[in-house]
Structures are given as C-alpha cells and as structure tokens.
Image (cartoon, helix red, strand yellow):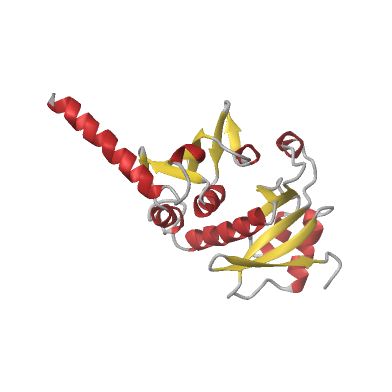
C-alpha cells in the first residue's frame, strides 16, 4: 500500500508540474512534447503537433529537435520540454539551454554563440521560414576569414519539402549570425563568404537580446 501511495503521489506531482509548465490557455495535450537528451545535445520528440514535421532531423524513424528549434518552440508556447521525465518551465529551459555548461562543448564563447543562433532562428521562424544546417562550404578559408559564424540554410515555409532540401534543393538564402555589439568582419571577408555560398544569396543577422537585424551581402563588393 505504501508503494502504491508513493507512486500515486509521484504521478500527482508530475501532473501538477506539467500544469505549471504549460502556457496559460493551452492544454498540455495540445502541445508537442519532447525529452531533452544531454548526451545527444538534442530533444527527442515524444508527441508532434502542428508543423513540427518541417523541423529537426530523423534517425531510424525518430524525430529529434536541435537546440535552436527547442528554445524557439518553448518560447512561443507550442512545445512542452521534459528533462528526466519532468516538465520544464520556460525559464528553466532557457537556463538549461542557454547557460554555460562547464565540461561540455557549450561553455564560455560557445554558449554565447549559441544564444546568437537561437535569436536568429527565432526571428526567421516567426517570419515564416524554415532554418536548417547548410551543406558544407567548398571554401573553408572564406568561412574562417568571416569569423566562423553560425550559418543557416533558410527556406520559405510555404511549400517547403524536407525531402527536397535533404536532396540538395537550393535554399532561399543563407544567413550568417553575428553579435550586434561586436565589430563585423571586414567587407572583403563578407564578400568572399557570399561568393562561397553562391548561388544562394547571403544575409547577415546582427542579433542581441532575442532580436535580430538582417542585411544582404553582395558578393562583388569590396
């Protein structure tokens, strides 16, 4: 009996935490649900709702979400994120995903760079785009000269095909993420990066505190 009572209390506690973590006005059943996997650095989708199929990656039929996708969906209130089976509030998810993580790949400058990519991803997601990792660049030197920014291949969400994108369909444009408060790379370095990603157009995102400003880069400038 004691064991049954303990299990019942644990279930009630989980339901209570889930209600606290669910955005107001929305039922937990109406949300997509994913479990954070620290070892993978990805979130495993347990239940997908809405347009979630355009996001993430699939391994052996299992959908996984990248950090940028997870934080964006949690912020907008469409994803319930779990860790070790426990639901996380928006604040707890942000601390876990954005805070420096000593001893991992995400500490110091890497954590700051990840915050830039999340801000850029969220701005594009809100504007109706799908962001994916780009194909490897042929010119690594141009990438390094531009400061090795995070790059996204960006597609219009309307008419987007995951299969076509994975087969090499060209993106609408590529975006490079930079911090708004830091100096931009020299014009000739950005121009070289634009040539490296051609024929896709290159846009730069200057991001800070969750906001991003975009501008185009012309490959022939400088």
Question: Could you tell whether 168 is left or right of 54 in the image?
Answer: right
Residue at the far left: name it.
2
How far across and down, in percent of the image, does residue 172 sit? 79, 51
- Quarter in which the C terminus is drawn: bottom right
Residue at the far top: name it.
1
The structure residue drawn at horizontal position 57% and vertical position 26%, both measured from the top left corner, is 60
Question: Could you tell whether 135 is left or right of 72 in the image?
Answer: right
Residue at the far right: name it.
220
* Front-most of residues 33 and 113: 33
* Front-most of residues 155 and 20: 20
The structure residue drawn at horizontal position 48% and vertical position 59%, both measured from the top left corner, is 111
Establish if 28 lies above or below 67.
above
How far across and down, in percent of the image, does residue 90 sit? 43, 54
Count of numbered tags: 0
The structure residue drawn at horizontal position 51% and vertical position 39%, both measured from the top left corner, is 30
Question: Could you tell whether 91 is left or right of 186 in the image?
Answer: left
The structure residue drawn at horizontal position 39% and vertical position 48%, both measured from the top left corner, is 21
Establish if 10 lies above or below 187.
above
């Amino acid at each position: 009996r004691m064991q049954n009572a303990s299990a019942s209390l644990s279930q009630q506690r989980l339901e209570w935490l889930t209600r606290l973590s669910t955005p107001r006005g929305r039922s937990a059943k109406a949300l997509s649900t994913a479990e954070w996997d620290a070892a993978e650095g990805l979130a495993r989708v347990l239940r997908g709702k809405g347009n979630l199929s355009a996001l993430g990656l699939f391994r052996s039929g299992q959908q996984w979400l990248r950090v940028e996708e997870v934080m964006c969906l949690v912020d907008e209130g469409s994803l319930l994120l779990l860790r070790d089976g426990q639901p996380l509030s928006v604040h707890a998810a942000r601390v876990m995903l954005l805070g420096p993580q000593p001893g991992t790949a995400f500490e110091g400058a890497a954590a700051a760079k990840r915050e830039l990519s999340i801000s850029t991803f969220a701005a594009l997601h809100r504007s109706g785009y799908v962001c994916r990792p780009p194909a490897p660049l042929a010119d690594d030197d141009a990438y390094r000269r531009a400061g090795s920014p995070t790059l996204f291949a960006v597609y219009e969400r309307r008419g987007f095909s995951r299969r076509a994108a994975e087969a090499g369909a060209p993106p609408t444009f590529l975006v490079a993420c930079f911090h708004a408060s830091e100096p931009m790379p020299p014009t000739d370095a950005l121009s070289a990066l634009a040539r490296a990603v051609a024929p896709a157009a290159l846009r730069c995102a200057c991001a800070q505190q969750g906001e991003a400003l975009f501008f185009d880069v012309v490959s022939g400038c400088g």
